[in-house]
Image (spheres, rainbow, N blue to C red):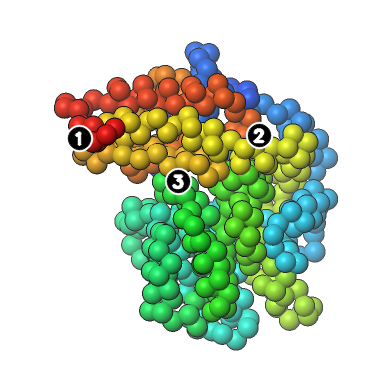
């Protein structure tokens, strides 16, 4: 039966009438309409950190909807959940004198952060500072600026003219970043936007000194540092926002996903007092003419507050660090499989299994073929450009990780190659 639902990032000619329908979920597992259970190996889309079926988050949203379901936060209007959530996030974030600007998700947050960075320099009189630097494999959503600064070329191509004044720097090459700064002219750069661990671009783990080096480079040249913590935040790297592991205090942090564990759409930007100052100092002088309809949505913020309570009560934020080596140890044996080029794991509770180039050449849409094969083995994973990624809920246990590795291995064995890829020497 044909579908009228247009799926994001999907080959609709192939998907049409062939959907995998998720019916319910509980804990670290989801169930299809036939009642079969699947380990949620990717926490839906990197976000269900506290697991499914948390009744207290549902109840908090219901209570708020019964009292005040929604109302604009434009001008001087506020609501108690938005005020309280802003206070809690500001206190948790490694950002000086933090302010919080809410939106509906990560893409909103990135567009807000880029516009804020450029507007900050305009307010300071440095009108030439409009350029934004990002890095290879970085994913920053699909809104205008997020599409423009992405480090994933297929996401940037095919749209015609995009917002300009941006450059993608090398992934792990500090000298390459220095070269980009020199070529652009640091006096023209408004901000550097970076994920501590690139997520949708392939789960590329940080190399020693890179993030710290970027932060120092930005400090030296007065460039604003924007940390995209949409995936890396709320325990995924074992801290609240991920960037704490590097000892770096950025100018802005974008967040979404784990702030409500995906129970309701919410995101935003945590902004330093210095960057916020042009709009917070003199009444009547300046208004930021930017903001989505649902900024500070009371029901979404109530869900966020309840989610933070779960993280704190169950000490889940630290789990991302505690589980990084068990995840690495579960997946590392896959490197001996002749179809596997690399396993990237060991920093945070996320990982990628990249396929050999011969497999990518020999099997059309190999990552999604592997995804579907793993699903038959009872595990949901995320298909990426050259392989699959995993990021289970923070409540996952050792048995779940063993099942995850077993399902991926079974999926690899099921890849329809006409001739096996020869094993690497010593494998």
| Local crowd size for mark 3, using a 10 Å CA cut-off: few (<14), some (14–19), many (≥20) | many
Q: Earlier in the sequence, mark 1 or mark 2?
A: 2
Work out which quarter of the rendered image holds the N terminus and state it: top left
What mark, if any, has residue 50 been given in the picture? 2
- Give the number of callouts: 3
In the image, 229: left or right of 364?
Answer: right
* Residue 386 in view (yes/no): yes
Residue at mark 3: 203
- Toward the viewer: 138 or 314? 314
> Which quadrant of the structure image shows residue 83?
bottom right
Q: CA distance from mark 1 to mark 2?
A: 38 Å
Going 33% across and 62% down the picture, which residue do you hit? 160
Whether label 1 touches label 2, CB < 8 Å: no
Q: Earlier in the sequence, mark 3 or mark 1?
A: 3
| Local crowd size for mark 2, using a 10 Å CA cut-off: few (<14), some (14–19), many (≥20) | many
Q: CA distance from mark 3 to mark 1?
A: 23 Å
């Amino acid at each position: 039966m044909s579908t009228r639902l247009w799926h994001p990032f999907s080959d609709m000619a192939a998907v049409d009438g062939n959907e995998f329908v998720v019916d319910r979920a509980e804990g670290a597992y989801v169930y299809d309409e036939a009642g079969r259970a699947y380990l949620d190996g990717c926490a839906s889309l990197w976000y269900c950190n506290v697991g499914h079926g948390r009744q207290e988050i549902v109840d908090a949203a219901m209570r708020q909807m019964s009292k005040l379901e929604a109302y604009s936060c434009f001008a001087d209007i506020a609501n108690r959940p938005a005020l309280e959530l802003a206070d809690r996030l500001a206190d948790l974030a490694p950002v000086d004198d933090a302010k919080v600007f809410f939106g509906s998700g990560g893409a909103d947050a990135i567009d807000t952060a880029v516009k804020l960075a450029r507007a900050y320099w305009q307010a300071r009189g440095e009108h030439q500072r409009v350029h934004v630097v990002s890095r290879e494999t970085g994913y920053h959503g699909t809104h205008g600026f997020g599409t423009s600064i992405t480090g994933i070329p297929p996401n940037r191509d095919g749209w015609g003219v995009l917002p300009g004044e941006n450059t993608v720097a090398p992934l792990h090459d500090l000298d390459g970043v220095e070269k980009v700064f020199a070529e652009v002219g640091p006096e023209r750069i408004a901000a550097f936007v970076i994920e501590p661990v690139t997520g949708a671009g392939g789960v590329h783990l940080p190399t020693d000194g890179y993030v710290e080096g970027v932060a120092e480079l930005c400090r030296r040249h007065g460039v604003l540092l924007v940390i995209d913590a949409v995936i890396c935040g709320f325990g995924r790297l074992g801290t609240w926002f991920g960037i704490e592991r590097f000892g770096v205090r950025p100018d802005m942090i974008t967040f979404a996903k784990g702030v409500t564990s995906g129970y309701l759409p919410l995101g935003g930007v945590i902004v330093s007092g210095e960057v916020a100052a042009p709009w917070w100092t003199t009444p009547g002088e300046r208004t930021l003419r930017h903001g989505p309809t649902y900024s500070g949505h009371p029901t979404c913020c109530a869900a966020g507050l309840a989610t933070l309570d779960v993280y704190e009560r169950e000490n889940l934020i630290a789990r991302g660090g505690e589980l990084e080596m068990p995840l690495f140890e579960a997946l590392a044996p896959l490197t001996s499989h002749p179809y596997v080029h690399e396993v990237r794991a060991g920093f945070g509770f996320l990982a990628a299994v990249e396929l050999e180039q011969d497999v990518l050449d020999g099997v059309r849409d190999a990552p999604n073929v592997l995804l579907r094969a793993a699903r038959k083995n009872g595990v949901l994973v995320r298909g990426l450009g050259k392989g699959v990624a995993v990021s289970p809920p923070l409540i996952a246990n050792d048995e779940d990780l063993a099942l995850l590795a077993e399902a991926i291995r079974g999926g690899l064995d099921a890849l329809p190659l006409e001739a096996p890829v020869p094993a690497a020497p010593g494998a």
